[in-house]
Image (cartoon, rainbow, N blue to C red):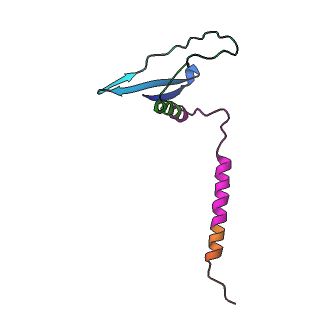
Amino acid sequence: MRWRAQTTIYRDSVDLICLERAFDREYVGAPVRFEMSERAPNTAIAEPTLSLPPASAQSLLQALWDAGIRPADWSSPDGEINALRKHVDFAEHVTKTLLQPSQRT
C-alpha cells in the first residue's frame, strides 16, 4: 500500500490517495468517511480510527511531506545548517593553519 498526497487549493484541502498493486493490477482506495462517536471522559479507546502497517504509515508520512505538509512544531533546519557551516569553516581554518609550510625568517 502506498500513498500520494496533493494540496487542492480550490477546496482548501490536502487530498490523500491510497494505491496498491497486486497481480498486475492497480487498485485505488475508495473514499473514506470518518464517523465520530461520543465517548465518556477518561474511558479507554477500544479501536484505533485508522491502523496502518509501518511501511504504509511511512509512505503516508512521505507523501504528506512531499506535498509540503510539515509538523506544527517543526522548525526550519537553518540553525543546524548554519552551525554545520561554522564547523566546516573552523575545520578548514585549522587544517590550512596546520598544513601550511612553516615560514622561515
Instruction: Please provide the residue range marked out in magenta.
Output: 62-91
Residue 57 x %, y %: 50, 30
Q: State the residue at coordinates (65%, 42%).
A: 76
Residue in front for this viewpoint, 92 or 57: 57
Residue 43 x %, y %: 66, 15
Please count the marks in the image: 0
Q: State the residue at coordinates (51%, 28%).
A: 6
Q: State the residue at coordinates (29%, 27%).
A: 24
Within the image, what quadrant is residue 22 found in? Answer: top left
Q: Main secondary structure of the magenta part?
A: helix
Residue in front for this viewpoint, 76 or 49: 49
Residue 39 x %, y %: 65, 11
Say whether residue 75 is left or right of residue 29: right
**Residue that protrudes farthest toward the bottom in the picture:** 105
Within the image, what quadrant is residue 23 found in? Answer: top left
**Residue 77 is a magenta residue:** yes
Residue 86 x %, y %: 67, 59
**Residue 85 is a magenta residue:** yes
Image quadrant for the N terminus?
top left
Within the image, what quadrant is residue 84 found in? Answer: bottom right
Image quadrant for the C terminus?
bottom right
**Residue that protrudes farthest toward the left in the picture:** 24
Depicted 64 relative to depicted 102: above or below: above
Say whether residue 22 is left or right of residue 14: left
Q: State the residue at coordinates (43%, 20%).
A: 29
Residue in front for this viewpoint, 5 or 23: 23
